[in-house]
Image: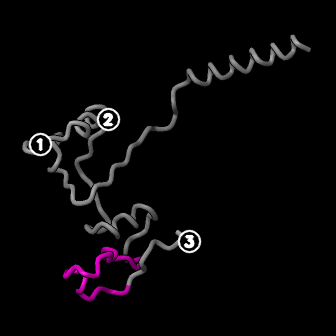
Amino acid sequence: MRYLLTLFALLWVIGHQTNAAEPQTKPNIIFILADDLGINDLHCYGRKDHYTPHLDHLALQGMRFTSAYCAQPICSPSRAAILTGKSPARLHLTTYLPGRPDCVSQKVLHPEIQMEVPLAE
């Protein structure tokens, strides 16, 4: 019995070592979402007065994209579109979610929107 347990333990260790040596088949992706950050605002894309060493290091190690699309140039609808894969108009979320009633800009009349991404999404 002891030999059988030892054999199973050795096979288990060998099996895990061969699996660990195999290369990953799925890509390793880091998605960075930053409000109000344009492509020309990073040092690695040519901006001289901004120092972004960590993002520059990531850009050197991976892929750099020079063209992008945003569902809406406002934070709340664009984030909802990323989370759901739907257009902001389809979600009825076409402007930022008001969070500061004391702010003058939030006293403007906006279309009726949902105050959250629907839980079904």
Alpha carbon distance from label 2 to label 1:
17 Å
Mark 2 surroundings: few (<14), some (14-19) or many (≥20) residues within 10 A: few
> Which dot, 2 or 3, sits closer to the camera?
3
Counting residues from the N terminus, which is met first, the one under dot 2 or under dot 3?
A: 2
40 lies above or below 69: above
Tags 2 and 3 touching, CB below 8 Å: no
13 lies above or below 102: above
Q: Is residue 114 magenta?
A: no
Q: Which residue position holds label 3?
A: 120
Amino acid type indicated by mark 1: Gly
Label at residue 62: 2
Label at residue 46: 1
Counting residues from the N terminus, which is met first, the one under dot 1 or under dot 3?
A: 1
Where is the N terminus found, in terms of image quarters? top right
Q: Position of residue 121 (x, y in %)?
A: 52, 68
Q: Position of residue 22 (x, y in %)?
A: 56, 24
Q: Residue at left 32%, top 54%?
A: 33
Mark 3 surroundings: few (<14), some (14-19) or many (≥20) residues within 10 A: few
Alpha carbon distance from label 1 to label 3:
42 Å
Counting residues from the N terminus, which is met first, the one under dot 2 or under dot 1?
A: 1
Tags 1 and 3 touching, CB below 8 Å: no
Which image quarter: residue 77? Answer: bottom left
Is 11 or 2 nearer to us in this picture?
2
Q: Position of residue 32 (x, y in %)?
A: 33, 49
Amino acid type indicated by mark 3: Ala
Which image quarter: residue 15? Answer: top right
Numbered disc total: 3
Task: Write the start and end of the magenta stretch as one range.
Answer: 89-112
Amino acid type indicated by mark 2: Gly
Local SS, label 2: loop
In the picture provided, is 116 more to the left or to the right than 70?
right
